Image: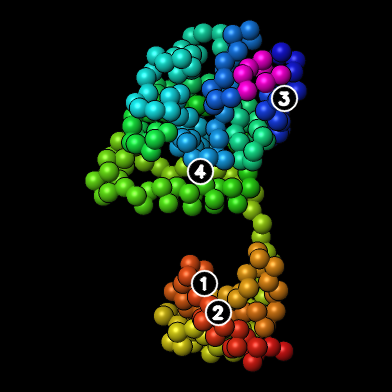
């Protein structure tokens, strides 16, 4: 088993079947123990928001939620106890993250980096309960493996929707009971679209300091004393829109944000008409 594990490098992706074969563990649950191989495989799933597992700022420590899907968790329950006692036992810890169905990304060997602490999270029945958070540290010198930005954006959006159903008092309690006051941090791979700067500058000059949507003058000037406007692609580049004069408009920051949030059809058509008139 040791030879097989050495072959895995941080960033390697394997299937659930391969994971089970390598570590001699079961095919389900997020904490999988192998008595035969003296190891505990820890899996953080992002394909569903069951637990709030996340990297601590700096990317060297991972906050991992314990076992138990209903009601308050217990520290002496099954694999929670194994993980808690791992520094004094022979059990090795291996961390995986799942962003796609049946694709397990290996992060490397980890160790328990400190005392577990308690937070409030939802259980399987969407009731708030107390859970144990285990601070894990990467054992190897390798850094945290980056992932696609789109996965984290989707995760953040799902978490936003979940938070909206809580009352102010419930939100205050969750925040109060959260030990970590720093933001979670993760290195990501993002897609960057190189915009034609000639189109950007031409659009701004044609707008003459006025927003194409609200028709008001830019709310402030930049350090060069120029009216600050942002160039917006009416049909987003990420959705296949072209980088051309007929697909851009100059917007104030407020209207630019509005277009990305509301996507109002009438306003989109207004900008298309303006862009068509400017088309070269």
User: At 30% from the left edge and 36% from the top edge, which residue is drawn?
Assistant: 177
Numbered tag placed on residue 185 in the rendering:
4
Q: Is residue 85 visible?
A: yes
Compared with residue 114, is residue 259 higher up or lower down, i.e. above or below?
below
- Tell me which corner region of the image, top left, top right, bottom left or bottom right, holds residue 234: bottom right
**Which residue is labeled 1 in the image?**
263
User: At 27% from the left edge and 49% from the top edge, which residue is drawn?
Assistant: 167
Q: Element type at marker 2?
A: helix
Earlier-in-chain disc, 3 versus 2? 3
Q: Are marks 4 and 1 in contact (CB under 8 Å)?
A: no
Q: Nearer the viewer, mark 4 or mark 3?
A: 3
Q: Are marks 4 and 3 in contact (CB under 8 Å)?
A: no
Earlier-in-chain disc, 3 versus 1? 3
Front residue (pair 268, 135): 268
User: At 67% from the left edge and 15% from the top edge, which residue is drawn?
Assistant: 24
Earlier-in-chain disc, 4 versus 3? 3
Q: Are marks 1 and 2 in contact (CB under 8 Å)?
A: yes
Q: CA distance from mark 3 to mark 2?
A: 49 Å
Task: Reply yes or no: does residue 23 show up in magenta.
Answer: yes
Magenta residues span: 20-27
Q: CA distance from mark 1 to mark 2?
A: 7 Å
**Which residue is labeled 3 in the image?**
18
**Which residue is labeled 2 in the image?**
268
Query: How packed is label 3: few (under 14 Cα within 10 Å), some, or many (20 or more)?
Result: few
């Amino acid at each position: 088993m040791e030879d097989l594990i050495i072959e895995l490098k941080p960033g390697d992706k394997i299937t659930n079947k391969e994971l089970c074969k390598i570590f001699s563990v079961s095919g389900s649950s997020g904490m999988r123990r192998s008595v035969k191989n003296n190891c505990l495989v820890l899996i953080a799933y992002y394909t569903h928001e069951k637990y709030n597992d996340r990297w601590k700022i700096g990317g060297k420590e991972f906050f991992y939620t314990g076992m138990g899907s209903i009601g308050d968790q217990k520290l002496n329950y099954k694999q929670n106890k194994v993980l808690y006692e791992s520094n004094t036992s022979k059990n090795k810890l291996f961390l995986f993250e799942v962003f796609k169905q049946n694709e397990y990304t290996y992060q490397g060997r980890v160790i328990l980096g400190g005392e577990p602490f308690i937070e409030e999270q939802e259980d399987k029945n969407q009731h708030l309960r107390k859970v144990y958070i285990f601070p894990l540290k990467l054992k190897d010198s390798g850094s945290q493996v980056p992932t696609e930005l789109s996965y984290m954006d989707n995760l953040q959006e799902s978490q936003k929707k979940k938070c909206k159903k809580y009352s102010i008092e419930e939100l205050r309690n969750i925040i109060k009971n959260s030990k970590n006051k720093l933001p979670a941090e993760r290195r990501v791979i993002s897609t960057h679209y190189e915009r034609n700067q000639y189109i950007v500058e031409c659009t701004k000059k044609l707008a003459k300091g006025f927003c194409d949507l609200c028709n008001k003058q830019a709310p402030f000037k930049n350090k060069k004393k120029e009216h600050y406007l942002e160039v917006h692609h009416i049909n987003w580049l990420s959705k296949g829109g072209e980088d051309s004069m007929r697909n851009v408009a100059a917007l104030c920051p407020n209207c630019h944000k509005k277009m990305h949030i509301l996507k109002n059809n009438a306003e989109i058509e207004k900008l298309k008409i303006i862009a068509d008139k400017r088309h070269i």
